[in-house]
Image: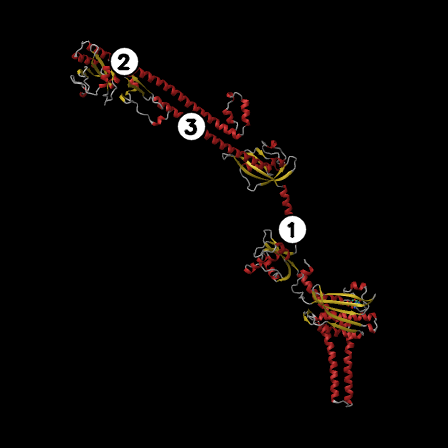
Amino acid sequence: MQDAPASELLPESKNPNPAWWRHWWRRQTPTRQDRFAMLAPLAAVMLFLAAIISAFWYLRLEEMDREQEAVKRDVEYAQQRVRLRLLERQEQLMRIARDISNKEVDADEFVVRAESMLAQYPELQVLTWIDERRRIKASYSAPSMMGGLLRVPGEVLRPGETESMYGLARDLQQPVYSQPVAGTEGTGLLQLHVPLADQSRFGGVILGEYSIDGLLRYAVPAEISAKYAVALLDGKNRMLAGNTVPPRNPATQLLPWAAQPNEYEVPVSPVGNGLILRAQAYRTSLGVIGSGLFWLVIALAAMTAWMLIANWRHTRRRVQAQQALVAETNFRRAMENSMLTGMRALDMHGRITYVNAAFCQMTGWSEAELVGRTPPFPYWPEQDREMLAARLDDELHGRTIPGGFQVRVKRKDGSLFDARLYVSPLVDAKGHQTGWMTSMTDITEPNRIREQLQASHERFTTVLEALDASVSVAPLGSEELLFANKLYRLWFGGQAGGHLQMVAQAGVAEAPRTTDEAMDEVDSFVGLPTGQLTTAISENAEIFVPELGKWLEVRSRYLNWVDGRLAQMVIATDITARRHAEEQSAAQAERAQSASRLITMGEMASSVAHELNQPLTAITNYCNGLVSRIKSRQISDEDMLAALDKTSRQAQRAGQIIQRIRSFVKRSEPNRTLSDINVMVAEALELAEIELRRRNVRLSHYVAARLPKLMVDPILIEQVLVNLLRNAAEAIEHARRPAGRRSVELRVIPRQIDVQAVVEFSVLDSGQGLAPEVMERLYEAFFSTKVEGMGIGLNLCRTIVESHHGRMQAENIYNGAEVAGCRFSFWIPVSGATNPIVAKDVGKDTGVTTA
Ligand code: ADP
């Protein structure tokens, strides 16, 4: 394209040194080449125009010269003719003058001669004979002359008129022409004074008067006056006769040859400078034609130049468009080469017309191997050929699938891969469809990832679905259910109602509401890092859902849902069975506690019997003494009353013992109340003392002042204390301690364990202590070292303590290396003891429990 103007501009045949030119041309930048290609024709047009103008100029100058020459020649010729005519007339007049001088002609003869002369030479108007005294002797005027000019014979010439000429003729004795005088309407006259000699003496003049107009008309040849505007001018360039060319049109004045009007003037001798003959060339049609041609050439050249410029601009636009196109093509090619999508173009008959680099790379076949191929294509797997042929047929008939379709493609090495094809029509610049463009994407990797994702999703779903906990996720402040697993759907259906109910019932968080208050709470999360919120807020609660008839342990936490919303996940585990078991074990424990108390009483039966024996013996003794004294009538009323009083007190005491035992062993519902530690300790001591006294064991106790009340079941705590005191007494008994070392101490003091305020109960004995193997199995049920021991006492004690959130421990007391006894202690927290049967906070201590 860029070389084209060059070859047009510089055809090789006309180029003297093509190699040099070409070398020079190639060195130029494309822009400069374009500029040259544009400027050269323009310069050529300008040169052509200049040549035309100079040719016109030259020709015109030539012509003007020629014309000037012709005018000059013609004017000279006309002047000759005028001169000749004037000289002839002068000759004739001189001849008449000579004849008059010789007295051969008198006045009459003069008139006759004048008449004949005037008739013959019409330019002569008047012939007058004037004597030496300026008197007119004879005169003849042409009939056309006006009366005023007639010279009357006998008259003297008017002074001034022709006086100087007359004088000059007289002095010079020569014919003298007057300065022509302009008259009106061609009445201008030229006078010729021819002197008369009368015997060498001046004898007057013959005055011949020419009409200047007539002179022009008759003296100038007709062919000259036809060709030119001929005029006679006086010495001051005033026109005397003839005509002149009107001044030229100012427009044509611009033309170079119009600058000088083609004219020529020459003085007419013998008159001299007083009479000038001038001829002006008429304007010829050549000027019109010439200027027309000239303007045409100018217009054509301008048009050519304009067209060249327009053409250059057009070319420049085209070059720009071409550059843009090239850039676009390069861009697209780069894009096409860099992309991983294979591209294949088919013509309308299914022949491959194009494949890109990616397509070749994917299939392993080269472009040369693919372009021009018709179906079946080499990358079709043999087993899919029919299907692919049908697909291609669909493709060629425009039955394309909008989302593309998936096929298997065979590589050159025989391996297969999955690909997705998208088909779109190929349309040329004229809007005609020329084929189909197919893009191919290798989807093996996406497929594998999808399958992996699918598998992982399936695993995840299977796990979630198989989970025997219901999992549901709902956004805050909305009734939409984002996720629910199988168990949730089984329990609550597909609605968010169950989720919201669980949230509300558990009091885990505010159930989503649309009130401002709820929004305020949601707002209060704003500003908190969501991560913190989602990890921090995880609460557990146990709730009973009447619709399901189930106990559920509900745990919830906030999480960022996949769409970025803050959502609440609720995991509910069916803990009905556990609750039942717990309830059952609680009932069993309760039964065991009562049984244990009965056992304790059974074991203490001899002690109790002994204890009861005392008041009963006393009552019997009092009664016997009373009976004998009443029989002997030795008793006063006061003594009797005193004795009865004592008897009654003993009976009361016995009743008290029985009452205490009854209340201890009576099976009662677990009942936690705020209980006074002093009361509990007093009652436990009262029961234990019966046993301790029987075993000769001293019992001392210390209860710290101002202890808080404890939220406990007092009977159970008394049972623990009685058990521990009894074990202590038995250990002392078993160790056979001497009387001085038979003591048990009960201490109740406030303590601080792990920032928790507790009340510690401890029982110290001076028994044999705990052997290591006993220490290990201390709280095992039915473990006992005693012959009649049941081995459930300590086990029960620990259960009771722990059900009150307390802990129990045992340790030996040493006296040097010797074991001096042991110490059983337990503590009960001052506050925070709540009913374990009602919702309890298990999360903090025991961690997450799942079914
Ligand atoms: P039992 O008293 O019926 O044997 P316990 O559960 O009360 O059942 O006691 C279990 C065992 O713990 C006892 O058999 C005894 O060996 C040991 N034991 C309990 N208290 C003491 C104590 N104060 N000193 C020494 N050993 C003790």
Whole-percent x, y for residue 484 in the image: 61, 54
For disc 3, the neighbor class at 10 Å (few under 14, some 14 to 19, many from 20) is: some
Whole-percent x, y for residue 104 in the image: 18, 9
Whole-percent x, y for residue 381 in the image: 63, 36
Mark closest to the chain's N terminus, 3 or 2? 2
- Mark 3 against mark 1, which lies toward the viewer? 3
Q: CA distance from mark 3 to mark 2?
A: 56 Å
In the picture of the structure, the residue carrying the numbered disc 3 is 302
For disc 2, the neighbor class at 10 Å (few under 14, some 14 to 19, many from 20) is: some
Q: How many marks?
A: 3
Q: Residue at 46% x, 28% y: name it.
A: 308
Please name the amino acid that badge 3 sits on.
Ala
Circles 3 and 1, Cβ within 8 Å, touching? The answer is: no
Mark closest to the chain's N terminus, 3 or 1? 3
Q: Dot 1 lies on which element? A: helix
Q: Is residue 32 above or below residue 115?
A: below
Please name the amino acid that badge 1 sits on.
Phe
Q: Is residue 375 visible?
A: yes
Residue 330's image quarter?
A: top right
Q: Dot 3 lies on which element? A: helix
In the picture of the structure, the residue carrying the numbered disc 2 is 84
Q: Quadrant of ligand 1?
A: bottom right
Return the residue nearer the eye: 80 or 539.
80
Q: Is residue 489 above or below residue 802?
A: above
Mark closest to the chain's N terminus, 2 or 1? 2
In the picture of the structure, the residue carrying the numbered disc 1 is 460
Q: How is the image coloured?
A: secondary structure
Whole-percent x, y for residue 619 in the image: 76, 82
- Mark 3 against mark 2, which lies toward the viewer? 2
